[in-house]
Amino acid sequence: MDSPTMQAAQREALAKRILALSSADRTEVLVSAGDAALTRFTHEVSNQNLAVENVDVSVRAVVDNRTGVAQTNRLDDASLRSAVARAVEMAKLSPPDPLTPDLPGPSAYAPVDGAYDAATAVAGANVRAGMCSPVFAAAESAECWSAGYASTSTSGLTVANTSGGVASFDGTDAALNVKMTASDSTGFAEGYSSAAGSIDAAAVARTAAEKARGTANPSSVDPGEWTVVLEPAAFGEILIYLADHFSAQSFDDGSSFCSDGLDRSYFSEQFTLSDDYAHPLAPGMPFDFEGQPTQRLSLVENGVVKSILTDSYYAKKLDRVNTGHALPAPNAYGPQARNLVVAGGSKSTRELIAQTKRGLLISRFWYIRTVDRKRAIVTGMTRDGTFAIEDGCVARGVRNMRFNVGIVDLLGRCEFSSEQRRTGSYHYSMVVPTAKFERFAFTSVTDF
């Protein structure tokens, strides 16, 4: 059975058909085909199944260095002609920008192993039900109730332009998100992969249940500065608030911490960060939404910021190399990382905990909000599994706490486990290890 998602050859034929309709000086067509399904569950019952299949077409037209963009998901001739005409007309009405770049020409793209899984591409509700079943069994065994979702998706993208550039990519994705609730405690675990069959649903469920049972009868601890061990989900939720600082747009407008200069040491020597679309735990697209090949880029090496991310516009404006990190036009965010990876350390997670005299083990955070953009200060709360560490052992569950920390400062006193794991929810995905931080500031304690 083939995936119902429009195939690359079909997308490329559609894109070339649209390009032939344009009278603009330069035209770019982005065809995005997606097929996504999700099963939600609560109290060991599947309570919602939803699926969406769609093909979006976006046309970017450039006339006399003026740019216009129009979109449609109707693929008949009249609708496509209308989208092209609207893009051209909007370009003529837009102010000219002498920095408007040329569109990328033909390029070669490196193959990405593991980004597409044929079984996941055709996964139906039975596959997602199979992922939920071990969760329900674990919940009943642990006398908890579960909530969460299982999802599968297929996405195909083609970018083509009048400079001769054509790039296509197909990928699949699957996720299992589990929260277990006991009488006065909760636990969380997650699993992500490009192949649904490689997610160990029983292990995810077991971990969430153990956290819920392990934090029963939580006690309070005093707010203040603590040594913390953040599991990958918690670390990723904080780190995402640093990602935009590596955008050339943030660097240029002065809102990034590294606007003060590159090749400077901002972090601990332990911290090394890259953007790597070919990482085996999170294989991604080898080009950006302009069709420019994406560089596997080292952003931070042993604490020193080495690079920022560019697209064609900011490469031209700042006279830098185009690293291939454009978002679909138009966007207000500038170039962005899509596959962040934090290098692992030399110790296991178990060793990080064993070497902690007094601290907290944190599973995840909730409602993180920015307090100071330039200094990357954020606030938020712990959730679904917060434990006290005493004399190198996970001792007991504690009540949730509110924190207020500067991420740049925090990464100046960090240590990482050797095990990396993909994490991500909602708007981000990345590969990170467990992280240990000193002097993590908590401001208050909750009553749950």
Image (cartoon, rainbow, N blue to C red):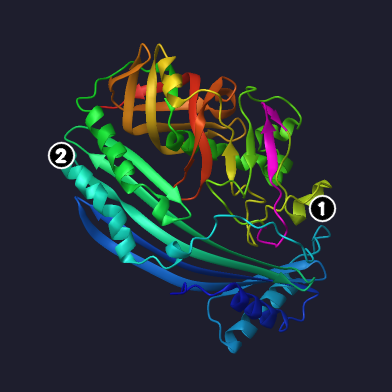
**Residue at horizontal 56%, vertical 47%?**
280
Residue 254, compared with residue 221, is above or below; it is below
Location of residue 301 in the rendering, given as x and y in whole percent from the top left corner: 69, 30
Instruction: Compare residues 265 and 195 and report the one nearer the observer.
Output: 195
Q: Is residue 448 visible?
A: no
User: Does residue 8 appear left or right of residue 251 in this picture?
Assistant: left
Q: State which mark lies toward you, 2 or 1.
A: 2
Residue position marked by numbered label 1 in the rendering: 316
- In the drawing, does residue 35 fall left or right of residue 262? left
* Start-end of magenta stretch: 287-305
The 10 Å Cα crowd at callout 1, few under 14, some 14 to 19, many 20 or more, is some
Q: Is residue 139 visible?
A: yes
Q: Position of residue 107 (x, y in %)?
A: 77, 62
User: Does 289 appear in magenta?
Assistant: yes
Q: From what the image shows, is residue 312 above or below residue 361?
A: below
Is 112 included in the stretch rendered in magenta?
no
The answer to which of 433 and 337 lies nearer the viewer is 433
As displayed, is residue 28 above or below residue 409?
below
Quadrant of res 61? bottom right
What residue is at 29 percent from the left and 57 percent from the top? Answer: 130
Separation (CA) of disc 2 from disc 1: 60 Å
Q: Which residue is mark 2?
A: 143
* SS type, badge 1: helix
Residue in the picture at 82% in, 53% down? 316
Tell me which amino acid carries mark 2: Glu
**Quadrant (top left, top right, bottom left, bottom right) of the C terminus:** top left
Q: Quadrant of residue 327?
A: bottom right
How packed is label 2: few (under 14 Cα within 10 Å), some, or many (20 or more)? some
Vertical position of residue 298 compared to residue 389: above or below: below
